[in-house]
Image (tube, helix red, strand yellow):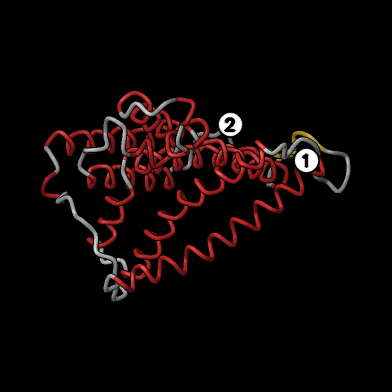
Amino acid sequence: MSIFEDTLDHYTMNNELTESNIYSKVIFALLAIILNLITGSPLVPLLIFLLCSFLILYVAKIPLRFYITFMAIPIGFAVLSGVFLAFLGTGEQIWSLGFLGIGLTKGGINQAALVFARVLGGVAALGFLILTTPMNRIFAVFHDLHVPSIITDLAILMYRYIFLFLDVTATMYNSQKTRLGYHNYMSWMNCLASLAGMVFIRTWEQGEISYKALASRGYNGQLNMIRDGDSVKDMSMKDWILIILFVIIIVAAIYLCGTTNLYPI
């Protein structure tokens, strides 16, 4: 099985929302992120997380296992940040470590819960866009928004070679495994060092080869992309209604929840 069979790039091109209008997804994701940031209660970001997760899992039909893997790293950082905020916050202390006055405070727990919920909501909203949209269509939006071409071109090349070197790394790793590599601690360290060195060398070589290939094809400092014609004008009435309905629901939740927290202040 190819390394591309179970990667982000594979699922962005093989889901139920791949062919949907890119601007519908961009507008939805941006509004969700903005609303996620302006709320003062953790309940609203959790609602955004649930709605975006529903769209990702049941509408786009992204596999649950891959979605959990996608969310694992940001959630891990959110948990660590939440722990520090809970202990370093202000307000009435409800539990003490017994030294230096460090302990859990009501304000710290409220702040930790809000930050954790915002991470969940923000990553889910951004994940909705990333997991349902091929990157070439997102890069096309960059051009429409007049992002400097050098930034877009660098992003395209970086994204392209991430998967190339993942494939190279997987091939080298499997080759080492078939030669009894990684069978003990010392072998694991030697093989890992060898793998890192070889991938670095291959990266350097591939950069030179890529530049020569581009130069031989008349590269003038800008990559030309094939556009598929999506625009804001192509958005259907159904897309607009769903986006407006989403905004109404979240704004109503922000109004009703106010600054509701775990501990009233």
Quarter of image, res 114:
top right
Looking at the image, the residue that sits furthest to the bottom is 220
> Is the Cβ of the residue at disc 2 closer than 8 Å to that at disc 1?
no
> Mark 2 vs mark 1: which is more N-terminal?
1
The image quarter containing residue 86 is top right
Kindly indicate the quadrant of the structure image that contains residue 129: top left
Question: In front here: 259 or 235?
Answer: 235
Q: CA distance from mark 2 to mark 1?
A: 17 Å
Judge left or right: residue 88 versus residue 221. right
Q: Which residue is under mark 1?
A: 103
Q: Residue 147 at x, y = what percent? A: 31, 66
**Which residue is located at x 26 percent, y 74 percent?**
218
Query: Tag 2, which secondary structure?
Result: loop
Percent across and percent down for residue 171 are 55, 43
Residue 68: give x, y in percent of width and height.
Answer: 51, 30
Q: Which mark is residue 262?
A: 2
What type is the residue that disc 2 sits on?
A: Leu
Q: For mark 1, does the 10 Å Cα neighbourhood hold few (<14), some (14 to 19), or many (20 or more) residues?
A: some
Q: Position of residue 201 (x, y in %)?
A: 59, 62
In the rendered structure, the answer to whether residue 258 lies left or right of residue 235 reads right
SS state under label 1:
strand
User: Residue at 23% of width from left, 43% of height from top?
Assistant: 24
Q: Residue at x 55, y 59 (%)?
A: 202
Mark 2 surroundings: few (<14), some (14-19) or many (≥20) residues within 10 A: some
* Viewer-side residue, 111 vs 73: 73
The amino acid sitting under disc 1 is: Gly
